[in-house]
């Protein structure tokens, strides 16, 4: 449709997925986000988001009909009505659309299709489209539609009605969404380029008609079998020219190429996009670089053990999911050593066999990873699977534009450009559960859906047994399977490591240490002890007593320090091990032999690409370090050993950063079973006591010291101690390198987290940095916190505002502009001209980035301003409602919901949408203390219907159950009593 047609169009969408009396349809909850993303995409047409009403899943009969009637009154071009959920029938065979409270005995709670038809038929809209995708019951989530005999009854004059099946057939709904709607989304997303039923070529059509879309959906579903059930053929009913309604632009239309994503990325970074470099490699190149233990990732070395055909992480299921729904990536979640990398590799092999390209992203701190990834993706016109193993390693703080991988650019620039070029892109990443639980990671979840790996004990034993029989046949023949199993344990990664070493010993005829019972805990230290003894390195002879088993032997200290200092050159690793060893009473004089033993075991390997020494797997580092930090019972921290281990980082700035990163990863996992707090307290104590020494180490190098401070700033408990001891720990580096480009991370951290007086000391340094680097995109991270400061001289404040507005004039459309705008729009002492410019920049930025998570930080101060023009206020409200479509249930949504509900400019439709979003937030967050703010805003709002008042009363009672003794409780009770009177 044209822009003019889009402005005159309206849509009402309802996906009812939760029911009181019918089975829930979780997949339906995904239908509307997927469909709406296509209908509102500018490349498709597009319906303005503000013209689309998405009804809450719990909407009742009257509200649904009101929304359809209102949209019908407002639309003068296209009126689109969409419903997905359960369908059932009244006593005379009429179709009923189920609501949350519908039941087969309370038919009045459902919406008769006839009532929808009448509302649509009364509309003066030029084009009318109704899409009915409703389920009625069944284990496979069956859906009911109209029968062939009823098609004419469903039809609307001058309109098109699309249904997912005939009356007597059953459609299917999967966890990803209903099959019919998913096919509809695919057609809108991909377009049509083959021969259409009437002989036209799809690639020559600029727009898709309703008949074209129907044909595309029907072709995609023809012959499909899902969960052993055939997918029914959809139906279409039209009258007049209903089959000719232009529903969307055809993405497959052959036209001149638009400006590429390379240009957009150049605008964002100030640098041209680079050619493909080794940080993004194809799967074959990635495999060729595997050595040592990591060769077990290759099927020829160790065949893959499937988690079972019905498990969500089964590789074929994963590939089909990625292939069929490329708008959502998959994030594999599991503990260290649970098979994340191997599963990704298996999906990669399947993709290669299907004709896809497979690209692996390799962390490389100084690389422009996003640009290189874009170059690799767009260089060939063929589908591509992007594999990002341990994606947290390339993010470095989700909202931080210092991250190697810019998720916002990936989501909003690269993927749309690839779709425009008909390049299908699928994203497969992995992460450990501990890191994922540490924060919201909103941008990550905008792109990925989580899939848990199978990690039950039975499966782990199955994988470990498979590793033993495959990699250590000589050992098994010599000792038997039961004895071999006892020796290697049941943790897969460690079982592979030990099987390799034991098989080597068995082949050489060497004695095999009796390991029975030592692997049941899943730790490495007993095995390392025996390896060190075999290499004639001294071990505490009294280790066998029950008392001494509580204490880790001193030889383990340098081993743990060595792995905590990886990846680095061997000399740096040994230096860290020796520094830790010096803090013990061990009889060892040098740690070189410990490091050589770890290399001999294959647990430390030289990376071919970098030449650095690294652990073969994170689990090696985690297990050895955990054995040092915690007692044998694993609950209490050993202060003396922890301090000795930490001393190993005082050898170089890079080692400080690596220690920080490796220990933070372990603490994330320990926190899952409440074991992190004791260790964190001891680490924080050590950092405070050694702040001066750490500061002296960091000041040795601008880049390595900056890297270490960047790690420290984002990883408690290091950051907590660093802020309290800023002058000793951070101050020396800032004094030496405060003008360095990398200082922007440290300056932002200090200006934001230090006390007011201490932060004031950083302002001159920050101003000097801005004078040198103020034109760069990184300057937003320094200018933002500078703009927020109120305790600076008037002339300094004027200078900062001038610099900030100048930066926005050049870079106002960059995502990073949000760092400045959120601070600038919140200031109340701007001149009239500055106010006008700040608001204009904010609204312009929100037009480009209003859907990203961080947009709420600009929307909140914008909505709180009392000097907005009526036009600007309406625009801000509309942008806020659009943001809430994706983020209404998230905790930060409260910051925009309260000021939004207070805006007097809201129209009736906007008011009801805002109230609905407030209820969505309360559904998830009503028990939180801050929920009283939204409850207060609702109770004071004059636009509540009687039903909304009752819902607010229900939420208020739930909140009072947790907070009845607070001051806010009294106000809410009084206000609620007044509203209910």
Image (cartoon, grey):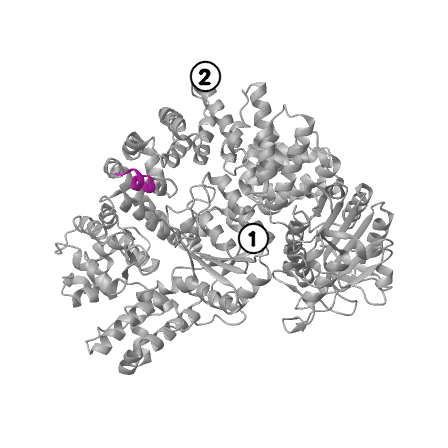
Which is more foreground, mark 1 or mark 2?
1
Principal SS element in the magenta part? helix
Q: Quadrant of the C terminus?
A: top right
Q: Which mark is residue 468?
A: none
- Numbered marks: total: 2
First in residue order: circle 1 vs circle 2 = 1
- Tell me where residue 49 appears, x and y as whole percent: 68, 43
Reading the image, the residue beneath label 2 is 794
Q: Quadrant of residue 89?
A: bottom right
Which residues are the magenta region? 701-708
Residue 455 appearing in the image: no
Can see residue 342?
yes
Q: Residue at x 24, y 38 (%)?
A: 700
Q: Is residue 341 left or right of residue 738?
A: right
Instruction: For marks 1 and 2, give the CA distance.
Output: 49 Å
Q: Quadrant of residue 520?
A: bottom left
Name the residue: 62% across, 47% down: 923
Classify residue 516 as left or right of residue 406.
left
In the image, is 24 to the left or to the right of 98?
left
Q: Height in image: 829 above or below 445?
A: above
- Side (left or right) of 47 relative to 692: right
The image shows residue 283 at horizontal and vertical percentages of 43, 63
Q: Badge 1 is on which residue?
A: 418
Q: Please determine whether, in this image, residue 489 is positioned above or below residue 258.
A: below
């Amino acid at each position: 449709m044209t822009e003019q047609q889009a402005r005159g169009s309206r849509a009402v969408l309802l996906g009812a997925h939760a029911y009181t009396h019918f089975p829930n349809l979780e997949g339906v909850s995904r239908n509307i986000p997927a469909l709406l993303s296509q209908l509102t995409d500018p490349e498709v047409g597009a319906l303005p988001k503000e013209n689309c009403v998405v009804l809450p899943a719990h909407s009742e009969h009257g509200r649904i009909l009101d929304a359809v009637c209102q949209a019908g009154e407002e639309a003068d071009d296209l009126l689109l009505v969409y419903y997905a959920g359960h369908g059932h029938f009244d006593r005379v065979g009429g179709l009923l659309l189920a609501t949350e409270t519908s039941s087969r005995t309370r038919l009045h709670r459902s919406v008769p299709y006839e009532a929808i038809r009448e509302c649509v038929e009364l509309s003066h809209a030029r084009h009318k489209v109704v899409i009915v995708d409703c389920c009625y019951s069944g284990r496979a989530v069956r859906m009911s539609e109209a029968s062939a005999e009823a098609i004419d009854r469903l039809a609307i004059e001058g309109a098109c009605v699309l249904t997912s099946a005939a009356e007597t057939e059953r459609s299917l709904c999967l966890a990803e969404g209903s099959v019919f709607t998913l096919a509809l989304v695919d057609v809108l997303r991909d377009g049509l380029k083959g021969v259409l039923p009437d002989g036209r070529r799809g690639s020559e059509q600029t727009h898709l008609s309703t008949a074209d879309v129907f044909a595309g959906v029907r072709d995609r579903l023809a012959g499909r079998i899902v969960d052993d059930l055939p997918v029914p053929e959809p139906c279409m009913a039209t009258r007049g020219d209903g089959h000719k309604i232009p529903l969307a632009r055809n993405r497959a239309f052959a036209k001149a190429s638009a400006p590429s994503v390379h240009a957009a990325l150049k605008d964002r970074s100030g640098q041209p996009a680079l050619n493909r470099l080794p940080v993004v490699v194809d799967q074959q190149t990635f495999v060729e670089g595997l050595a040592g233990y990591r060769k077990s990732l290759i099927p020829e070395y160790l065949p893959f053990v499937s988690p079972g055909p019905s498990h969500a992480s089964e590789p074929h299921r994963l590939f089909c999911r990625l292939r069929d729904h490329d708008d959502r990536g998959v994030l594999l979640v599991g503990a260290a050593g649970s098979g994340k990398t191997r599963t990704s590799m298996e999906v990669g092999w399947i993709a290669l066999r299907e004709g896809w390209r497979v690209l692996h992203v390799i962390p490389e701190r100084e690389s422009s990873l996003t640009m290189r990834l874009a170059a690799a993706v767009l260089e060939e016109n063929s589908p591509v699977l992007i594999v990002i193993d341990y994606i947290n390693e390339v993010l470095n703080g989700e909202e931080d534009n210092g991250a190697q991988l810019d998720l916002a650019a990936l989501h909003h620039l690269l993927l749309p450009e690839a779709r425009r070029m008909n390049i299908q892109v699928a994203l497969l990443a992995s992460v450990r559960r501990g890191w994922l639980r540490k924060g919201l990671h909103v941008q990550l979840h905008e792109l990925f859906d989580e899939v848990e790996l199978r990690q039950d004990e039975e499966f782990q034993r199955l994988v470990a047994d498979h590793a033993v029989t495959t990699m250590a046949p000589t050992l098994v023949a010599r000792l038997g399977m039961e004895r071999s199993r006892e020796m290697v344990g049941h943790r897969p990664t460690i079982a592979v490591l030990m099987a390799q070493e034991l098989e080597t010993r068995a082949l050489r005829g060497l004695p095999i240490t009796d390991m029975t019972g030592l692997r049941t805990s899943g730790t490495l230290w007993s095995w390392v002890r025996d390896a060190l003894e075999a290499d004639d390195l001294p071990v505490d002879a009294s280790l066998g007593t029950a008392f001494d088993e509580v204490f880790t032997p001193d030889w383990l200290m340098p081993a743990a320090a060595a792995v905590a200092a990886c990846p680095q050159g061997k000399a740096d690793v040994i230096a860290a091990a020796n520094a830790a060893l010096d803090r013990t009473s061990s009889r060892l004089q040098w740690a070189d032999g410990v490091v050589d033993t770890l290399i001999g075991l294959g647990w430390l390997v030289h990376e071919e690409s970098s030449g650095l020494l690294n652990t073969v797997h994170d689990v090696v580092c985690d297990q050895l370090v955990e054995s040092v930090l915690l007692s044998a019972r694993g609950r209490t921290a050993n202060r003396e050993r922890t301090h000795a281990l930490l001393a190993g980082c005082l050898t170089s700035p890079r080692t400080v950063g690596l220690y920080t990163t490796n220990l933070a990863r372990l603490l994330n996992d320990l926190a899952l079973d409440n074991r992190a707090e004791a260790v964190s307290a001891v680490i924080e104590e050590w950092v405070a006591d050694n702040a001066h020494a750490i500061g002296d180490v960091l000041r040795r190098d601008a880049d390595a010291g900056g890297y270490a401070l960047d790690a420290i700033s984002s990883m408690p408990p290091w950051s907590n101690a660093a802020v309290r001891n800023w002058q000793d720990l951070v101050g020396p580096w800032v004094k030496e390198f405060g003008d360095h480009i990398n200082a922007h991370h440290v300056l932002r951290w200090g200006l934001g987290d230090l006390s007011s007086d201490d932060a004031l000391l950083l302002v001159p340094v920050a101003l000097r940095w801005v004078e040198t680097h103020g034109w760069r995109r990184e300057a937003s991270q320094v200018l933002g916190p500078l703009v927020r400061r109120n305790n600076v001289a008037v002339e300094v404040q004027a200078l900062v505002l001038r610099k900030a507005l100048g930066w926005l004039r050049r870079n106002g459309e960059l995502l990073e502009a949000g760092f400045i705008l959120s601070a600038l729009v919140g200031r109340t002492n701007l001149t009239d001209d500055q106010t006008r410019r700040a608001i204009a920049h904010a609204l312009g930025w929100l037009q480009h980035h209003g859907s990203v998570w961080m947009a709420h930080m600009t929307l909140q101060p914008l909505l709180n301003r009392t000097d907005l023009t009526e036009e600007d206020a309406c625009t801000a409200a509309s942008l806020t409602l659009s943001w809430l479509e994706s983020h209404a249930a998230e905790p930060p949504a409260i910051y925009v919901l309260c000021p939004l509900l207070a805006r007097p400019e809201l129209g009736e439709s906007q008011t009801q949408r805002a109230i609905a979003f407030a209820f969505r937030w309360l559904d998830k967050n009503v028990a939180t203390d801050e929920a009283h703010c939204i409850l207060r805003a609702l109770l004071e709002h004059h636009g509540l219907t009687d039903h909304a008042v009752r819902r607010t009363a229900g939420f208020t009672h739930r909140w009072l159950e947790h907070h009845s003794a607070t001051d806010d409780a009294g106000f809410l009770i009084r206000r609620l009593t007044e509203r209910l009177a």
